[in-house]
Structures are given as structure tokens and as C-alpha cells.
Amino acid sequence: MDSFNDQTNMASLLATRRSGKARDMVAPGPDAGQLQAILAAAARVPDHGKLNPWRFVVIDDRAAFSEALMAIYLAGKPDAGRLEREAVTQFATQAPWLVVVISSPKPSHIPRWEQELSVGAACQNLLLAAHAHGFVGNWLTGWAAYDAAVLALLGGAAPERIAGFFFIGSQARPLEERPRPELACVVSRWPA
């Protein structure tokens, strides 16, 4: 491909990326090679100090993850009703693939804020790479992202944090565009 087509394709990719709803995702999801390429692209982000202040956990056994997540949820809410339990199970098992991004700050002279920005860039690259491979992605958090026991389940410990749960698959129905901000509302010039 020539440079013009590469630039046109990149502009189109950026302009059309849209989150899909994880609950609406169906197979096919990425195959093993595509998932590897998606994760490799996610890791190609600005990273002051070359610290890799993020890591990815691919959830291969969704049934076991669902059971473990339910046990953690019920430990905190033993009186959870049927609908709450169904929501936990659906969260853990929806979409063909689930990748958890862990913010993993490193002791360094590089400020933690800069490391966290790199984590956010890795998250966005993951979504863009999924889109580039013809899939949709959905970045979710919720209670599980802020629960220390879930972090421990994923092999993490403070000061690590769960940046998000990334669901990847094919969309079962057309995506709806959401309102975007008018550039005049979010762009300013200096000096004014």
C-alpha cells in the first residue's frame, strides 16, 4: 500500500472506531494470531522510561472466571438476589474474548501520572487494534475493577489497579453512533 492509502485508511479507522456493547457481541472473535497482534499493537504506546506500566491478562477459562468472580461478589453481598447474580455471570461470560488491562506502576523517577497515561494509551490501542482487525471492543469497569480480591484473582496487588475489562467480538446488530462533542466546545486556542 502506498503512503496516501495508509494515511487514508488510518484516518478512516480513527474516524469510525466505535464501542460495541459487550452483551451484544457474538462469535467469531479474534483467532489466536489476531489476538496476539491486537495485544502487540496495544503494547506499542508512548512509555516514558520504557517501564511497561501495564500488563494484559487474557481470560481463557471464562466459566472458572465467572465462578471465582461470583464467589468474590457473594463474599461482599451474601444476600445478592437472582438478578444481581445473573448480572455477575453475564459480565464474566459475555463476548468471545475478555482481556483485562492492569495498571502496573513501577518505582521510578517517572511520575505515576505519566505511567497512568501510558496505561490509557494501551487501552485505546487495544480497542483500535480490535477495530482494525474487523472486531468491536468494549471497555468496561464496574465493581469488579475496584475490588482488591478481583485484582488478587488476576495476580495483582496494590499499587496495581484494574484499568478495565475489554470485551472483543463481532457485533450481533448494527452499532449506533453516540453524540460526540462539538470541537468548538473542547478545543481552545492560546493566546485567545
Image (tube, helix red, strand yellow):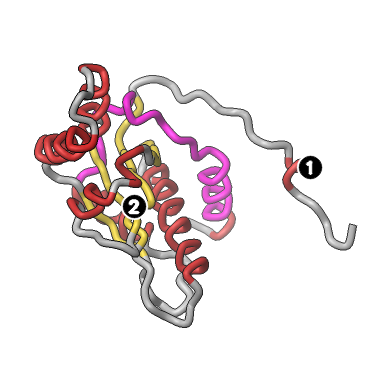
Image quadrant assignment for residue 102: bottom left
Instruction: Decide if residue 12 is on the left or right side of residue 104.
Output: right
Marks 2 and 1, how far apart in space?
A: 33 Å
Per the image, is 14 magenta? yes
Expressed as whole percent of the image width and height from the top left, the position of residue 37 reads 30, 55
Question: Is residue 56 depicted above or below 132 in this figure?
Answer: below
Q: Please give the name of the residue rendered at 42% of the width and 60% of the height, measured from the top-left corner.
A: 119
Q: Please give the name of the residue rendered at 20% of the width and 28% of the height, measured from the top-left corner.
A: 89
Per the image, is 34 magenta? no
Tell me the number on the disc at residue 162.
2
Q: Nearer the viewer, residue 124 or 101?
A: 101
Q: For the magenta stretch, what is the residue range?
A: 5-31
**The disc labelled 1 sits on which kind of residue?**
Ala
Q: Which residue is mark 1?
A: 184
Q: Nearer the viewer, residue 86 or 33?
A: 86
Circle 1 crowding by C-alpha within 10 Å: few under 14, some 14–19, many from 20: few
Instruction: Decide if residue 56 is on the left or right side of residue 122.
Output: left
Expressed as whole percent of the image width and height from the top left, the position of residue 21 reads 39, 28
**Can residue 34 be spotted in the picture?**
no
Expressed as whole percent of the image width and height from the top left, the position of residue 22 reads 34, 31
Q: Residue furthest right?
A: 192
Q: Please give the name of the residue rendered at 45% of the width and 51% of the height, measured from the top-left corner.
A: 124
Q: Quadrant of the C terminus?
A: bottom right
Image quadrant assignment for residue 78: top left
Q: Nearer the viewer, residue 34 or 69?
A: 69
Of badges 2 and 1, nearer the viewer stands 2
Marks counted in the figure total 2
Give the secondary structure at mark 2: strand
Give the secondary structure at mark 1: helix
**Can residue 102 be spotted in the picture?**
yes
Q: Please give the name of the residue rendered at 52% of the width and 48% of the height, measured from the top-left corner.
A: 9
**The disc labelled 2 sits on which kind of residue?**
Ile
